[in-house]
Amino acid sequence: MTEKNQLKKQMKTRHITMLALGGAIGAGLFKGSGEAIQLAGPAVLLAFIFCGLILFVVMTGLGQLVLSDQKQHGLSGLVQPYLGVHTADFIDWIYWSMWMINIIAEAVAAASFLQLWFPNIPAWIFVLILALLTTIINLFSVRLFAETEYWLSWAKISVVIALILVGLYLVATQVFDLGFFPTMRQMTDYGGFAPHGLKGFINSLLVVIYSYGGSELVAITISEAENPKKAIPQAIKGVMTRIAAFYIIPLFLLLIIYPWNQLADPNVSPFVMVFQKIHVPFASDIVNLVIILALFSSINSGVYASSRTLFFRLSNNGQKKSRFTMLNKNSVPQRAIMFCSGTLYLGVVLSYFLGDKLFNYLAGSLSYTVLLIWLLISAAAFVLVRKQKKMGYTIFLSGAILALILLFVGILITNPLAVTGFTALLYTIIFLSFYWNHRKIEKTSEKS
């Protein structure tokens, strides 16, 4: 990339740290936790711990890739020296498609939560407003995007901290009234710790993986961070702490305070139930607002991640004159942002004609994509640490790769066939597009 066509380094360490923090808190926690509990019962704790340990190893490997000498940017730039050009092209496009799917699904979800307050306003109007907001924020400058995500993350973190404090108070009250062991028995009194057995545990992994997806977003900031080799590894180091603080501790407290089958109500967020228990006024409205903010944050991050991935991919493909790689006066890829946020409008049209079925397929395919991205990151990091002869990292990454393959097989068995078929078709198109694109470039070179 020429200096004129380079992204500006405007993200500070605090932005990236908070982006990593906020990335761990989304609708998967506030709303999806109830669905995961419904599938696995109290055993959902093991699902979050198991996937959290895998994520920790994956993110540690990602940190090693960031610290190595890199001349390219984006996920493709991190994996290309170790897995080759074709894999680099593949990971960029599946990552881009993941965010495209995600922003459509979450925009429609956000609209449904807004309709709880304004039932007479059509969903497409809310999606339009969200699309315009995210487009403006991303077009203005990367600093505005970073500041927006910084404060949205603070809002989400504050609610989780409040839940933990309230939860600790309620658990302490129960222990004082009933005793320690009767209080702890809450998790095994209703069908046991794993009421749906191994199948329920495996099914819950689909939701858990979806909840953790997006943590790798910090790697996309490498081109716009003021000090990426300091900021990104620093953000990655605390990933296990964030998982414990934002998922495992709150879920543990929830499962002690309420029977798991009450928390599994799909119509009520577990967070609402806790705040209602201490008679917080407008508890459901407060949590509804936080869920909307979490979804907006995810959409905003999705537009950022997808536009930068599109920018990197087309630049790396030798298409520097592509309209999607052109930067505006604020040094952001304007047309790439417009194209990616424009997907939201397509989502409104599709949802009007196809309804919820489409989004069930899309959401189901996201877990496959997150797993595959983690697997490719781990494989690239494995090659790197083997070359560097770091035995400890090599062993841990080997374990993570094996666990990810087993997870992939487990989800393959339990996922609906239509979701698997849709995802397989998408991957096949992306895989073969590499050859089509290279033939096109070769023909262009021959003519010139």
Image (cartoon, helix red, strand yellow):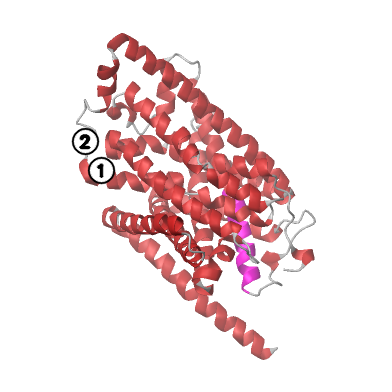
- Residue 314 among magenta residues: yes
Q: Secondary structure at mark 1?
A: helix
Residue 340 showing in the rendered view:
no
Q: Residue at x 21, y 36 (%)?
A: 195
Q: Secondary structure at mark 2?
A: loop
> 243 above or below 5?
above
Task: Name the disc covering residue 287, or none.
Answer: none
Residue 67: image location, x then y, percent: 60, 57
- Mark 2, other Cα within 10 Å: few <14 / some 14–19 / many ≥20: some
Task: Name the disc covering residue 200, or none.
Answer: 1
Image position of 183 (left or right of 353) = left
- Residue 347 among magenta residues: no
The reply to whether discs 2 and 1 touch (Cβ–Cβ < 8 Å) is: yes
The chief SS type of the magenta part is: helix
Q: Amino acid at mark 2?
A: Pro
Nearer the observer, 398 or 436: 398
Q: What range of the chain is rendered magenta?
A: 302-317
Image position of 85 (left or right of 227) = left
Quarter of the figure with the C terminus? bottom right
Res. 37 image quadrant: top left
Residue 159: image location, x then y, percent: 52, 27
Q: Residue at x 60, y 32 (%)?
A: 154
Mark 2 — residue? 195
Residue 88: image location, x then y, percent: 53, 68
Mark 2 to mark 1 CA distance (whole Å): 8 Å
Q: Residue at x 56, y 65 (%)?
A: 76
